[in-house]
Amino acid sequence: MTGGINSGGGAGLRTAVEGIAWPAILPDAGAHLLAINFQLEDSQWWSEETMRRHQLRQLRELVRFAIQSVPYCRQEIYRVWLRRPDRDAWAAFAELPLLSRRRVQDAGETLFATALPAHHGVISDGETSGSTGIPLGYRSSTLAGFFWDAISLREHFWHGRDFSARHAFIRNKPEAQLGPAWGAPSNVVFSCGESANLPINGSLSEKRDWLRDLNPRYLMTTPSTLRALAEIALDGDLPLPDLKEVRTVGETVTPALRALARQAWGARLTDIYSLSEAGMLALQCPVTEHYHVQSEWAVVEVLDARGMPCQPGQIGRIVVSPLHNFAMPLLRYDTGDYAEVGAPCACGRGLPSLVRILGRRRNRLFLPNGDVSWPNLSSLPWVALAPALHRFQLRQRRDHSLLLRYEASRPFTQDEQGNVCSALLEHLRCALPLAVEQVDALPPSEAGKLEDFITEIEDAQEAGA
Amino acid sequence: MTAANSRKSSPDAVLRSDIPGIVWPAVGSDASAHLQSLLFQMTHSQWLGEAELQFRQLYQVKQLMRHALSTVPLYREALSHLDPDVLDWEIFRALPVLNRSELQSGFDVLQSSAVPPSHGAVTEGQTSGSTGMPIRFLQTAATKLFWNALTLREHLWHERDFSGKLAAIRVKVEAGHHPDWGMPVSALYRSGPGATLNVRTDIEKQLDWLLRENPDYLLTHASNLAALAELTLRRGVKLPRLRQARSFSETLRPGLRELVREAWGVGVADVYSCEEAGHIALQCPLHEHYHVQTENLVVEILDETGRPCAPGETGRVVLTTLHNFAMPLIRYEIGDYAEVGDVCDCGRGLPVLQRIHGRRRNMIVLPDGRRHWPSFPRIRYTGIAPVKQIRIVQRSLSDIDAIYTAERPLTPSETQGMVGAIQEALGFPFKVMLQAVDEMPRQANMKFEDIISEVAVPGQNG
C-alpha cells in the first residue's frame, strides 16, 4: 500500500462531506494545509533564480511590515534596503547586519511586532535553551505555526509515511498515554493510526520496556536517545520487528548513527533540522541522506568566517530569515549552527542542499593550537569499549581540559576506562587532560536534547556579536 | 514520479493570497484551499496504477451505493438485493444500465430524498439536448467543486499561461469583456483578461471579433472551431498571439487538428465532458488521446454484449458519477461511443480513450447492417469543389442527402467529384443527393454534427 497522500488506500483522508471519501473534501483547516503543499509540490523543482524571485516578493512584504510595526526594524538600513530595485536587492540583503543570539537577547521586546496584520492569528510566546545558559525568548503567530505544520506535512509526504501505522514519540512532551492519533498536523488531514508519547527524561529501561510493548512502525526521538536504544537492541534486548523508520530531531545526526539504526532494526533514519525560534529549516531529502533547505519558508544562508556565502563542500554558519513570522521578524538571524553546503541534489529538487548539519558553535572542540573541529563521538565503538554504558556527554572546560560524564548500569572497570580514554583522545587527535565521572542522570537541555559534546569555551565571534 | 512530470503550473503563475503581507506561498480563500486540496490529491493519484485506482474508486462507489440504496427510489427498488459492503467490480458490472431515455423520464425517481447537508446547495440543470430532448439533472456544491477542480487540472496539464488573454465562444454566455478568465481560474490565480461571445453569432462576425480580440487562447465548440479555422484560411487572416485552441462539447472530427494547425499554427486541446456527469476525459498533455477522470467517475466502455472493451475496441460509454449524492447516476449509458486506448507512456495510470466517436446517430449504417463512423474532413473535398461546409444525412439504407454551402454553384463535374468523394468516405456507393443552401442550419443546441444517420438501428438511440 502506498504512503503519503495516498496513505491508507485513499481511505485515510478526513472528509467534511458525508460519503465523499475519495478524493476527499477536507475540513477547511486540512484543505488549507494541502493547498500550501500543492504549491510546495511545484516550487521544490524550481531553479534557484525562480525561487529567489518568489522569496524576494515575500521578503519585501515582511520588511515593509517590520519597518512599520517592529521597533527594532525602524532603522534606516532596512528602509534603504526596501527601496533597492530587484536586480540588486539580494546583494544589498547580504550586507544587512547579522542578528546573533546575543543581539536577539539584547533586543528583547523591540523585536516583537506591536500588532499583527489581520488574519495572522494570535501571538504565542516561547523560550529556547541557550548555549550559554541564557534562554532566548521568541514569538510566533498562528499563521507562522500554520506554515510550520504545512512543512511538517511535506516532510511526511516526502518520506511516504503510512498515516494509518502506529507511531511512537519519545520527546520533551508531558503526556505518556496512548494517544488517539498522531497529533497535528497529521490528524487534521488524515484519520491517523495510533500514536504514543513518552517523556524523554525517563530512564532508559523505561523507554526500552515501553517501546518493546508498543512495537511501532515509526519512532521519533533525539539522536542521543536513539543511540542508547539502538545499542540495547544490538544486545538483543529491544527487537522492534515492525519498525521501519526512526525520525530524529534536535541534535546532530552522524553517518554512524544512521548505520547503527540500520544495524539494530533495519530501520532508515530520517532527520529534521528545525529551531523553535525559526521553524522548519531543512528536511532530509527523500532520495539521499542530505538535507533540503525549506526555501519557501525561510531564506537560508550558509556563510564563511568572512560572511561570504559558502560553496559546495565548505562549512559555514547558518543564517536564516523566516518569511512568514510577522510576530517577530528575524532578518538574517545567526542560528549558531553550522552546516556543510552541498552540490545540486541528484533528486532534481532545486531546493538548496546541506550535506550535514554540524551542530552549534558550542559543539565545536577548540584545540590549544587554534584548530577547531566538530567531534563525531557516535562513530566510536562504544558497546565494545564499555558494554555497561547507557549515555555519555563530553564537555570541554574553559581551560581546554575534557570531562567525560556517563550513565551506566555499573562503573567502568579500570581497563574499560583506559580504553575509552585512549579511543577518545585518538579520535579527537589531541592529548588534552581527560577526566571520567559516572553520574546517575545526565541533564538534558530544556528542549530535552542531550549533546555528545559541549564546549564551555566561547569564541570571539559569539562573545563580540 | 519524476521531477519533470510532477510539474504542474508555470512558476510565473501568481496565486491569489487573502492574508495581508503574505504573497508567497499564497494563503487563499477557503474556496481556493478546497480546489488546491483536490488538485494536490489528484496530482498524486494520477500516477497510481490501475489496481490502486480501482481500489480507491470502489471504496467511493460503496459510499455512493449506500446512499443511493437508502435514499433514491429507483435504486432502492431496482437494487434492493445489493449489499454495498460486499460490492466488488464483478457485482458492479452486473448492475443494470440506465439509458438516456430512462434518465429523461426518471427525473423524480432518481432524486435522493435526503442529500446530506454537507454536500451544499442542490441545483437543477438541463442539458442542451441535440435531439431536442433535454435531460434534467441535479448537482450539488460538492459536484461543482469537482467540476472546477478538474477544469483547473486541465489548465495545469496543458501548462497554460494565465497571464494571457482567453476568448470563449460558446453557449450560455453574453458578449462581453472580463477582467480575468472567470471561475475557477480566478479563484486561485491572477489571470489576464477574458472575452466572451455567444456561439449563435454569425461566423463571419465571430472571426471579425476574434481578430479584434487577438487572444492567446480560444475556447469553443469543436464544430465552431472548424468553421472559424476554415474561414480564417479562406480570408487569409492571422491570429498572431494564439497559442492553443480548446474544444469541448462535441466530437472532434478527424482532420480538425490539422485544419487548426494550418489556419493558426497551433494545437487543439479537447475535453470530453457532459453537463449531467461532469468531466469524463481530458486530453493527455503529451498526446492527442484522452485520460479518463477516474477520480470523478467510473467510465466503462462496453461492447454490444456488455463486456468491457479491450484496447483498440470501440464500445458504448457507460458512466457512474462518484460524488453526486443528489442524483446518483449508476451505470448511465450516455449514448456516446469511444475506443479504448493502451496504457499511456506519459506515466499516468488514468485509463486511456483513444478517441471519442460521438453518438450512435453519427454512425452510418451499411446495407449489410454493419455500422461505422465515417469522416469527411475538409481536406478530402477542397481540391474537388469550392464547398465551404457540408452535412451528410443518411435518410435510408440506400439514400444520402448532402447539404452544403459553397462560394458559387457547383459545375456538373464538381458535383460528380463530390458524390464520388462522399461515397468513398462512407464506404459504400450510396445514392447521394447534393443540395446547396445559403447558410448551414444549426441544431437547437448550437452544436454541429456533420454526419447524421436517420436509419433506425438496433439498440437505444443517442
Image: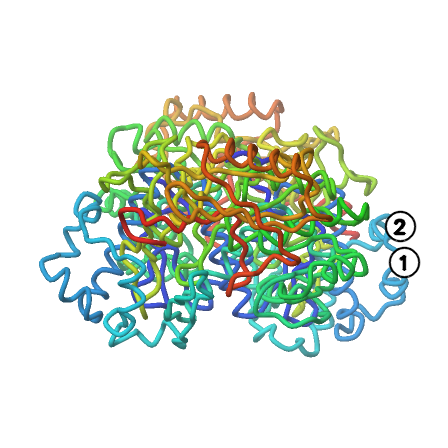
Q: Residue furthest front?
A: B412
Task: Report the residue at 24% width, 76% height from top.
Answer: B113
Identify the residue shown where x is 12% and y is 56%.
B83
Q: Nearer the viewer, residue A188 or B358?
A: B358
Q: Nearer the viewer, residue A391 or B374?
A: B374
Q: Are marks 1 and 2 in contact (CB under 8 Å)?
A: yes
Q: Nearer the viewer, residue B11 or B341?
A: B341
Q: Chain of mark 1?
A: A
Instruction: Answer left or right for B174 relative to B134.
Output: right
Judging by the rendered image, the residue that carries numbered circle 2 is: A88
Type of the residue with mark 1: Arg
Pointer 2: residues within 10 angstroms few (<14), some, or many (20+)? few
Tell which of A434 and B395 is nearer to you.
B395
- C-alpha gap between disc 1 and disc 2: 7 Å
Q: Amino acid at mark 2?
A: Asp
Relative to B124, is A291 above or below? above
Badge 1: few (under 14), some or many (20 or more) residues near its Cα, within 10 Å?
Answer: some
Residue B430 place in picture, x, y as percent: 45, 37
Name the disc covering residue A84, or none: 1
> Which numbered tag is attached to residue B416?
none
Image coordinates for residue A151, horizontal then vertical, percent: 54, 53
Among the 4 quarters of the image, the one containing residue A49? top right
The answer to whether residue A455 is visible is: no
Residue A312, percent from left and from top: 71, 30
The image shows residue B388, relative to residue B416, as above or below, that is: below
Q: Quadrant of the C terminus of chain B?
A: bottom left
Mark 2 falls within which chain? A
Q: Secondary structure at mark 1?
A: loop
